[in-house]
Amino acid sequence: MSMERITVLLAEDHEIVREGLRTLLEAEGDIAVVGEAETGRRAVALTRKLRPAVVVMDIAMPLLNGLEATRQILKAAPATKVLILSAHSDDAYVEQVIAMGAAGYLIKQTSARALSRAIRQVHAGRAFFGPAIVKRLVHRDQKSPPRAGQLKRQIARLSSREAEVLQRIAEGEANKQIAAGLGISIKTVEKHRDHLMRKLNIHDTAGLTRYAIAAGIIESSVQMTIV
């Protein structure tokens, strides 16, 4: 009599990290890794196809960051739980992840045991945040930086497509590249760019890029390799 295992999709852009996570999780008798995604876009597509119980999601993902991928996954597959596993624990990331509806957040320095426990917890319908994150959440209301709250509200006002276009702009893509990557016309990209600038009250590409870094949409280190 075999026990039904918790199906998991790994969304992580580094192959060596994915392999390590798969090995660790497959050693658990009650967890089955059913798919792997190296980009946020692929994670959304695979979730639609495989309907995993839990997606373990990195934030810094190419083409579509983990925050926006989380939003699209939860819309496409509401029964799927998203557990963030990130190298970053900045307030801006944590705030946005909670706003997007992720069920939990762990930093990558966590143990394999804590990760498998987190997967079981979110699968059971409970939230799970690692100790470093809990500490931030406890003090969040006391500090409550207005900037973080403002960023969160602004991001929530963007459509999924606008958020995708913003990330690609910040990653240094020209309108033509963005159009090809998203399968839309250059005119439509320009329209999205105009909407972004109006909604965020930012009127140049450099400003949009700085905003994307501050909001945790891309990593500053990624941008530094492009500039």
Image (cartoon, rainbow, N blue to C red):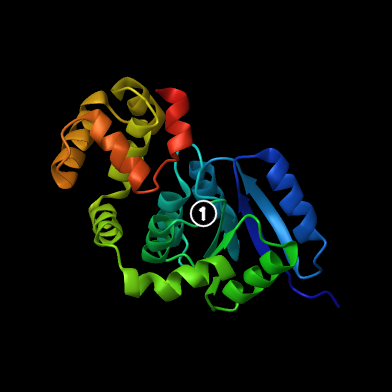
Identify the amino acid type marked 1.
Arg
Classify residue 197 as left or right of residue 69: left
Residues 197 and 106: in front is 106
- From the top left corner, tell me how far across and down residue 189 is, in percent: 25, 31
Classify residue 141 as left or right of residue 58: left
Q: Looking at the image, how many numbered discs can be counted on the residues?
A: 1
Residues 16 and 109: in front is 109
Residues 164 and 94: in front is 94
Residue at 58%, 70% (x, y): give it: 131
- From the top left corner, tell me how far across and down residue 215 is, in percent: 34, 49
- How many other residues sit within 10 Å of disc 1, few (<14), some (14-19) or many (≥20)? some
Where residue 90 sits, quadrant-wise, is bottom left
Q: Is residue 46 above or below residue 116?
A: above
In the rendered image, which residue does mark 1 sit on? 48
Quarter occupied by the N terminus: bottom right
Quarter occupied by the C terminus: top left
Classify residue 157 as left or right of residue 13: left
**Is disc 1 placed on a helix, strand or loop?**
helix
- Let me know if residue 130 appears in the view: no
Q: Is residue 168 above or below residue 141?
A: above
- From the top left corner, tell me how far across and down residue 25 is, in percent: 75, 60
- From the top left corner, tell me how far across and down residue 59 is, in percent: 50, 49
- Let me know if residue 101 appears in the view: yes
Classify residue 19 as left or right of residue 109: right
